[in-house]
Every structure is written in C-alpha cells, then in structure tokens.
Amino acid sequence: MGSVTTSTLTNPLNYPPVSQIARQSLKGTLWVAVINNASNGVNYYRSVNGGSSWTSAGSWTISATVREISSLHIGNDEQLTIAYRTAESNQDRIWLRRARATQVTFTPGSATLLASPGNGGTAGSVHTGLDVQVVGIPSDGTARAVVAAGTVVGASTGVTLYGANISASDAITANNSVITGKRQWLFTSLSTGRSTPALDIEHIGDAKTANVPHLWLAFGRDRIYVIKLPWAGRTWTGPTAGVPLQTIPAQDALAGRWDGKRFLVAAPTASAGATDTVTVVERNQANSLTVQWVTPPHPTGVVRNCTLAYNSTSGDFRVYAVGTSDTVLYYIDFQRATATWTSWVTVTTTPIVGSSGQNYAVRRESYGSARYDVVTAHAGSPNTVVSTHQVLTYAPDAPTWLVGSTSQAPPSNGAAMDAAASLDLPWLFSDPDPVDAQTAWALSRQIGSGAVQWLRSSDATWQSSEQKNAGGSSLRVLPAGWASPTDDPHTYRVRVWDTADTASPYSDGLVVVPASPVDPTITAPTPDGVTWVTDTVAVSWTVTEQSAYRVQLRDGSDSLHDSGWQAGAATSYTVPYPLADGVTYTIVVQTRNAKGLPSGEVTTSIVVDYVEPPLPTVSASPLPALGVIRVVISNPAPGVGEPALLGNDLQRREVGQPDEAAVTVVQGLSAGAVYDDWTVRSGRDYEYRALARGANGTTGYGDWQS
C-alpha cells in the first residue's frame, strides 16, 4: 500500500467505474488523477516503483470549477488524456486536455472546448458523466479522440459522442465528423440522475494497442445499452440504435471494459432476492451474443456500486463492490477455466469515504505488471488517498529453446550434433509477471520412442521420474559423450518454476540427432603449399559419407569466395575466382555426413606463380560523325617463357570509376583487333583496357587508356 495524497474534498475519487489510475508503458509508471476544486483543476501523482511511493507530478488550473473528470487515458504515445466538465455561462461545457509526461517532466497542454449546451442555469442538467478514448493513426502521426458524455434531454437519458482531431504536434481541434452516422442515443429512463458512460476500443488486451480500433460504448442509468462503432480507417460509424442488455438498479456510472476478446459491463443485479450480487454482462466481438455471470452474494448486503478489471493473461476478471452494512471495499474473481467464482475478500478493511462508499478507482487491466492496481479514499483530517496493488500469481510460460544462441547449441530443431563434444541446451524463461524469475527447472530426454528420463543435476544422471532441480540458470551443458553417435534422435523438453514455486508447462520438444563428423580428404590440389601456375583452381576430395559440401577460398583471414552449403554428392568444385600471381591461398573443404553433421574444416594451400601473357595496350579514338569510339588493341609478341596469345577481352569504364565498375564490352578478340564501341553515351568520358588470355590458362590486364 502506498500513500498517494491527502484531500480536503468529500469525494476525491467519485464514481468507481471512472478509472482515475492508469499505467504508462514508459518504465511502468503509474499515474493517478484527482480533482482539486481548491485550484479549479486536476492534480496528477506518479509512482515509478509500482505504487510503493507516490510523488506529485504536476497539475493544471482553469477559471471555472471542474465538476467531474473522465477516466485517465494513457496511450502508446505516452500522452495523458482527460475529458472534464465545467459549468460556465449557463452551459455544461465539455473539455479535452492532454499532457506530455516523461519520468522527469510533466507539461500540460491547453484545453479544447468540445461542447457547450445550455443548462438553464442548473449545472449538469444536460451532461453528467464522461469517458474518453484516443486512437493514433501511424501513417501521419495524428490521432482521433472521442468523448462520451452522459446526456439528459427532457425525460430521456442516454449518451452523446463528441470528437476531436489531434495533430502530430498535439494540437487539439474539435471535430464531430470523426463519428459518422449517429452519435447520440437516448431512451426513456425510469429514474433521474447521473448517467456515466464507458468507452473502450478493441485492443489486444493492453488497453492501448489495437489492430482495428473498433469503438465499444456502454451507457444507461437503469438499463445497460451497448453499442459497437466500426472503425473506418480515420473515423468511427455510429449505428442507429444501441443493444439493450440488462435492467439494473439506478447507477451513477457503468464499468465497460474490452478485455482483448470481448466487452464486459458490470452493474449491481436488479432481480428480487439477488440485489446483493453483481451481474457481469459479456458481449462477443461480433456484438451478436450475450452471456451473463452473476457473483455470489456480497458479504455486506445489497450492492451499492461496483467496477471491474480484467486479467490480460488468463482472461479472468475481478469485480470490486461495496455493499450496504458498511463501506468496506471487497473483490471477487471469475475464473474462466472453470467458469466459477472465488470468494469475496476485502481490498482494505478501512471504510471507503463517501455516503455510499464510492470513492475508489481500479486500473482497467493487469497488463504489464501482473497486478491489479486500486486507489481508495478514506476519511481523515484531511481525507487520505492510498493505493493498493494486488499481485497476481501466474504459472510461467512454457520455456522457449534458444537454438543457435551458443556455439555448442543446436543451430535448429532437428539438427545433428557431435556426440563426442559437449551439448548446450539454452532456453528462455518467460512469465506474465515481468519481475518474476526462475528458481528451479526439470529437463527430460527421450531417445527415439524409448522411455522418458529426467536429469538429476546433483549427480548428472538420468532418472525415471521427474527431477526438480533448484537453480536460476537457463542453460544446461551436457558433457561430451552425451549420446552414442548411433543413437536414435534425442528429444529434450524443459519446464521451470518461478519465485512462487509455480511450474510452467513443458516446452516443445527440441530434437537433436547424435552423430559423428566424417572428414573429407583433399585430393587436389596437393601437396599442401604446391606451386600453382594458372589463375583458376579446381578442388577435388574423397569422403566416405556426404550429403552436402562447402568450399571456401581464403587469403590469410580474408574470405574471397564461399560456395555456401551445396546439397549433393559432388566431390569436385571449380572456384569462380581469378587467382593473382604471387599470392598464397588457402582452400577449405567441409562436408556433411548422412545425418547432416558438418565435418571439420580440411585445408590445403597453393602458392600462385605463373607467367602471364604479354600485356596488351589500347588506343581509343572518338568518331563523333559515326557516334562510336574506335578501340585498337596491340599485343606484343610473346617473349621467352611467355605463353602464346589465345585472345583478348575488352573492358570499359567511366573515367574516375574503380576497377569493379568496369564493363566487359566484348570477349574473344584477336591480336591487333579493331573494335567500334556503339554502346557509349554522349557527354561522358570513358577509358578502356584489354585483357590477354594466355595458352597456359593465365590472364593479364593492360593499363587503362582514356
């Protein structure tokens, strides 16, 4: 429990369904918003340690009294958004305000007026009750906001939606056209008074992120109505009518929450003999099917007010409610796996302040912290506002194998590994509670279709029953000899325990194929260090078992060519790389055996020492009248020991470009050839060189000639 603030207000946290506490994604910061009528504004409080302590984070004031505020909305943009109502100039005015919040600063923006209907001098006679949602548009950095305002028109009660555009720079502009079709729904109410609606979008369970942000709306004072407004890309479309779901006792506010899969609305039960229960109405995503869940009786009698929050991991939800005989706040959980309720338990035994114990607020969801966060106000001089944080106990997620994360880990599921080397088995611990940790593990092994065994870490032996081993390490290293190379595939599975000693499910099976590497023998070029007299090299080898091969050419530590793994039984390969005279190269050959296990790297080296043909020269002359450049190649006669000329290739590049930018214009020209280059472009400077091919398999480039 953490102390948030003190307040001289009678109702600092009025209307429980209005969630005045929310979580910012940035470092999991919690925020609470409290009306401060002494300064005609709102005070913000922030906790960076999960609610253990709170600090004042800033405030804003206006000229008129703030009568009420909406839920505090925090989106993925880390902005805090609140709608609020004032009574000015005989009008019920609806305002929208945003604040940019970080860990060290709080900068409130200016307020934007969205509506100002005349109230005849009676504050709240038109609008009472507010909620707000904001949806970002990633394509341009803008956003759309919608505010739901409880509405009274004559004898009818209902809701009105107001819209706004938010620019990329956070400027707010009122714009009701963000809701097309209908945006006001009214019905004849059996009672008069406040009617606070609830808004949410079809998010993934985090109350922030939506693939398609369809809008859900719940409203009604003595009957629950639900409306789904489809998202049309930049606007929502309002249907002609809402769906009436449940008659309820007169309520000042409704709690409506999308839990990632469905829309939930909680209200006290109206049925005779069941008024000490809460009914949760559940609407499916298509808005076509309703399910009702009714709590067991509240320990303190007829329920006066309630709200709910959902478990974003399990889909369970928690109902909070105050009964009649006292104002102590209780909660109860609905467990989806068994469709059963737990028992009512107190949040805190200290009574909630207010005539009906309505001064409390609950964060909408448990996402990101594995906790339900509750803010309550209690009587004092002044009244106190405190937070309570209810930790949820989750089983850890099934561990995930981290294949390829270490040099001795399998590179993939089903890979062959050397049974004579150690074997790394690393996994990832994951838990819905981000601060939870691994405290123990169990590792199973199955060889082929044999019996499952479990590793006992104390003596590194395999046992016939599950062995729970203490430890937080998520890596197990099996020593060399962990298998026989002739074994059937090994399948490993792991489970873990967290700090609450709760076990995870077992992981998926990691299949490892025990094997023994089979090295090839290079048969050419040999012996190691042989002198090589041409500028190409072909490699051949023998091996007793091969399913793939790989050949590399290296100059020292530099890799000049890598064939990559090539499937098949071929035992020769011509390296497509021209060898330079006077360089020592290393040739590397690897093969895979029948199980796919790579061999070691087998190497041989060659020392290139060849005589290249006489180097050619070129002369290039532009012939503008013909639109060509004429190139004449001259080849000196071979000297003593120089190879005979087989032919010339001609290359061209733009002046100033590197050798690799050269284009081969033509191949196989004879000595003294004349070539007209028609492929040049006007206004560019070119240079040419010729390549001579010798009869001994060597080549030589002449100099570039502009």
Image: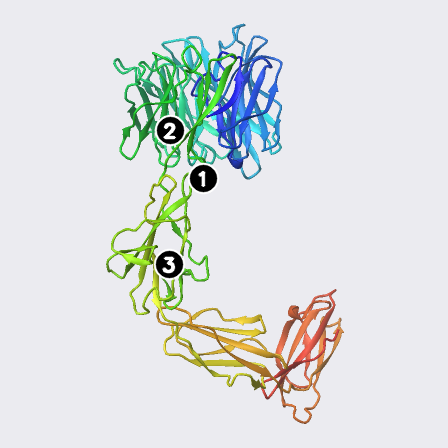
The answer to whether 280 appears left or right of 683 in the picture is left
Residue at mark 1: 435
Q: Amino acid at mark 1?
A: Val
Label 2 sits on residue: 263
Q: Quadrant of residue 107?
A: top right
Q: Is residue 226 visible?
A: yes
Residue 554, position as x, y percentages in the image: 56, 73
105 or 478: which is nearer to us? 478
C-alpha gap between disc 3 and disc 1: 30 Å
Q: Are marks 3 and 2 in contact (CB under 8 Å)?
A: no
Question: Looking at numbered disc 3 in the image, what kind of residue is underneath it?
Answer: Asn
Q: Earlier in the sequence, mark 3 or mark 2?
A: 2
Q: Say what secondary structure mark 3 lies in.
A: loop
Q: Amino acid at mark 2?
A: Phe
Residue 406 x, y percent position in the rendering: 46, 59
Q: Which residue occupies the foreground of this view, 417 or 237?
A: 417
- The mark nearer the N terminus, 3 or 1, is 3
User: Is the residue marked by circle 3 packed among few (<14), some (14-19), or many (20+) residues within 10 Å?
Assistant: some
Marking on residue 413:
3
